[in-house]
Image (tube, coloured by chain):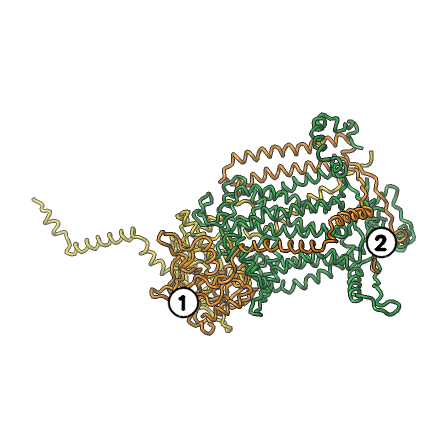
Amino acid sequence: MSAQTETEYTPIENTPAGRKLGGPVGWLDDRLGLAGAAKKNLRKVFPEHWSFMLGEIALWSFVVLLITGVFLTFWFQPSMSEVEYHGPYGPLNGLEMSQAYQSTLKISFEVRGGLLMRQMHHWAAALFVAAMMAHMLRVFFTGAYRKPREVNWLIGVGLLSMGMVEGFAGYSLPDDLLSGTGLRFVDGMIRSIPLVGSHLEFFIFGGEFPGNEIIPRLYMAHILLIPALLLGLIGAHMLLLVYHKHTQWPGPGRTNDNVVGYPMLPVYAAKAGGFFFVVFGVTALMGAFLQINPVWTIGPYNPSEVLAGSQPDWYMGFSEGLVRIMPAWEWTFFGLTWSFGIFVAGVGGLGLIFTSLALWPFIERWITGDQREHHLLERPRNAPTRTALGVAAMTFYACGWLGGGNDIIATKFHSDIFTITWVLRIGIIVFPIIAFIVTRRICIGLQRADAERVLHGYETGVIERSPEGGYAERHAPLPVTEQYVLTAHERKPELTGPAETDENGVRAPKAERSKLRARLRRFYYEHTLDKPTAHEVEHAAEHLGEFDGHPSEQGEDFQGVSESGIPRVH
Amino acid sequence: MRFSVRKLSTRRRHRFAGALVLLLGLVVAGGAYAVVAPQPATAEQATARDVEAGRQLFEIGCASCHGLNAEGIVTQSGGNYGPSLIGVGAAAVDFQVGTGRMPMAQTAPQAPRKKVAYNDEEIKQLAAFVASLAPGPAIPGNEYTDIDAATEDDVREGGEIFRTNCTACHNAVGAGGAMPNGKYAPDIRDVEPIHIAEAMITGPQQMPGFSDEAMTPEEKRNVIAYIKSTNSQPGAGLGGGSLGPVVDGVFAWVIGMGALVLAAVWIGAHGTRVKKR
Amino acid sequence: MSDLDIRQTQGSNEPIPDPGLQEHQYRPQDVDESQARRTERQISAMFLIAAVLFIAFAVVYFAVEPEETIFGWSAQNTGFGFTLGGAMLLIGVGIIQWAKKLMGDHEIVEMRHSAASSAEDRTEALAVINTGVEESGIGRRPMIVRSLGLALGALGVPAVVMLRDLGPLPYGHTETVWKKGMRVVVDVTGRPIKPSDMRVGDLINAEPSVFFETDEDGNRVFHGTELMQAKAKAAVIVVRMRPEAITPKKGRENWGVDGILAYSKICTHVGCPISLWEQQTHHLLCPCHQSTFDLADNGKVVFGPAARPLPQLPLAVDSEGYLIATSDFPEIVAPSYPRLAHDQKKLDEQA
């Protein structure tokens, strides 16, 4: 099959290198019994698609974070004790600052490669969270979280939330004016928690803000606690992926009971391993050419100083935005102050997002009643309600995000902050609703286009004129593989609900709940276009060969059409 | 014949000769002095000319909003087309006209910096005219703008003052910031030191003023030195406009994820295929 | 299964049957040895350039000075990143090219197994568990179980109690360092302020004079953590307006001096320092979440998420003519917290 048949393949144990390795490998196997695991896993099959690699971007970014992070720990000093700076960066010479900030300046200016490591670390963190979010969206929109992968989905939600906390802790460590202001915000946010807010605040900060405990404590969380949790969760995530095997797109030869793709050894070991180098390389090039977090221009933290354009890192932008656009809802009752404006926006916003994410697979399962194992992915257009809900949620998130940058938007686009805030206050409710409606209609439109292509074939670009004088475009049938892909999804289910009363007129137990469930199920499924039936396809195939009564010929070398509709010619 | 010089010179000397010599001596001395004397004497005379020229320029270019005598033109609703300039001083004029903000091309929440409409001579004249109306801040001298004389300690102190008073509106490096109702704190990174000093002294439009008692000329100089120093330090790559984490987020998604997703698409893509051999 | 169960329709109603795995298509490298060798050379070239770039990294490390710049950027940083990143990227691209073009690419089919354990496994597992549980005697010894439950529950007590010393209790922090007669001084320089130092429209970021006091040894009385903690509540801004523009609340008529007012610099939302002052509108904007306060109107909130007005510091002039505070802030400075209403009431009663 390959050009290598000219040279015969020698089993590895008979090659010179193999003979040398035989001893040590045998020694290990005598003690660890590796052969069983090896035989089972080394040729494990993984399906091929670019969207399956988004999680890998996150994984390799995490490895880059570990490597660059260890380097930084050699010099970073997590202490808030005051020192006077004396170093190569002139404008800050003689300034009082914390040791944390001073050691960050040292890494940036006195440790060769330190600035690169700092910038790589920060870019990798941004990519880590971005990749997790993109991966999560892919899993959501393709329905890959369904049974048996709900646990893996929960692990993923845990990874995303931990990753964001880790990033926040990380960029707060240098104790610069920008991140210190962010800590001040978090301090105010913790305070706003009803009943226990100021107790929590004093326990976390070790006293009044800023105290001198928060940086060392964040450091502990950042290099020990959360990385340990992340590593554990990543391990579990990968283990489940191996156990369940990866999901795959429906296609020729691909069923719910198999996996079609390439083996781990050699193909995926090479592709995934190579991708690690690509992620590292891209991150390093970003560290070389794109500046991020130049703490020396920002200055050390001082509670009487603040910068215009104070924002957290992008993944906290949602929380920041909600807090900005939230009206000033604070009330006093029972002799206590309840700062709902801050609490609901700051804590509640992210809490709502993560709780909804975590619960979604279970909610969907309750609504649809679908108890089967799913290993085939759904194209987003074939689950219009789910896709529309996802886009609505993304719109909600985006409104928060935009709110977080409202002053930058105002500066760059010469608009008014107050107007932007009001637009977002109303928009954060209204825009997701509009997005839901529009997305669902777009999905149905796409489904209709798919059905058209299955039944009536693709447009060949050949125009014919009928004897009566009319012009029409000739259609040719799609290749059967393409037709199969477009119809491999499930049929729209029956939408009748359970009977409210049985034959003796006895009302069914929990009737209200099952009525709600039935209504939700109808809402979920009714606005979807069912795929063509076998009869419709046969009928259409008959007509496809005709054109106004004349048969259309494709010729002998017609070889079908590619995905974009261009005829294949070899 | 014996000559007597005395007799000759006595008869030749006019009775007013002494006075004439004195007058000549005075004229020569005075003229020489005038030539080599320090500027103020000539400047005093030039300022009077400048004031008149400035008044003429003012009538043409500024009086339509600021009134013929710079008293301001008040609207019925209590606002103004242009505020009174009496007492704003030469510094304010040099700033507003020297940065192109004035004359304002159209009404707006804030006068933007734009192409300067007058040359240096004309600006000097306008400033002289407005300064003549009432005492106000003069155009700052070297003690405000001589940033080369600032020591490292001065620059550091300037940074502390900058972060305490200025970064809240103008951001960490002076790139600017948003204010309510379409106003903004402008980008000050490539502004001349003299204009920065004038802005601090006069508090243009919504910007507060910082008096010389609260922030001495030397401290103002240190702030300017810090701004210039921090913006001349080498960066660590493209700065994204120094606008902070928002732009970093855009870069992370567009450039970082963009590149990596493209790489993923490439990895998963089928390459060229050939017919079976 | 409930009535709502859906079953995948099979057989006759499926429009297009599965055409099965398609015939394998070959790559040029599979059929043409010279193409394969060309690809091999391409890949090897990438690896070689990567090796050279790694060496170049070391050259940059030892040969480029820290002050050198390129394109206005740090030459060291750019050099390191370019060589390291370029090399890693080339290695990655090379390996992936190898996988895509030269490694075997026949599609393989692997059968899945149900995620659930088999029925026999479950029965056996249950039997094993039952044997173990029965032998332990848990079912027959409820007293042991309950008392063990109590003991393990009580284990939580030291775990929680040990966290008590994470921090002090949050009571008694309602005051700042401001006292009657303390001078208001310019921040950073420590200079005291006379009313004549301010013109209408001026702004001074100020601190209490105690931050600049030194003891006998010349060391600052407030420094380090205490200074930061005190600053986070005591920082003020001093502004001068035309007296006609000010509308003081009852009792605050003499809190200003000739139109000079002092307010807390700490936003009542979540505590960012504010100093975006618009001298003509008298609005003070916080850059963090855009809360806007009207300083001519007792620090009232005019926009944004802040819920409480900005606390005002009552001013007077001392015997030498410098601005002083006549008392601490009558309102609690700082972001809101649960006991705020209660503490403020106590503070009001004391006054």
For mark 2, name the chain: C
Instruction: Specify the farthest residue to the top.
Output: A16
Q: Which chain is yellow?
A: B
Do the CB atoms of the residues marked 2 and 1 lie less than 8 Å apart? no
Q: Colour of chain C?
A: orange
Q: Looking at the rendering, in which quadrant would you find the C terminus of chain C?
A: bottom left
Q: Residues within 10 Å of mark 1 (few under 14, many from 20)?
A: some
Residue position marked by numbered label 1 in the rendering: C326
Q: Which chain is green?
A: A
Q: Is residue B125 above or below residue C38?
A: below
Q: Position of residue A568 (x, y in %)?
A: 81, 43
Q: Is residue C219 left or right of residue A485?
A: left
Which mark identifies residue C8? 2
Q: Is residue A388 above or below residue A376?
A: below
In the foreground, A446 or C140: C140
Q: Amino acid at mark 2?
A: Gln
In the foreground, B263 or A188: A188
Q: Position of residue A526 (x, y in %)?
A: 80, 61
For mark 1, name the chain: C
Q: Is residue A529 above or below residue A26?
A: below
Q: Position of residue A401 (x, y in %)?
A: 62, 57
Marks 2 & 1 on one chain: yes
Q: Is residue C71 left or right of residue A10?
A: left
The quadrant holding residue A329 is bottom right
Query: Would you say residue C100 is visible in this rendering?
Result: no
Q: Mark 2 or 1 closer to N-term?
A: 2
Q: Position of residue A490 (x, y in %)?
A: 82, 53
Q: Secondary structure at mark 1?
A: loop
Q: Is residue C71 above or below residue B84?
A: above
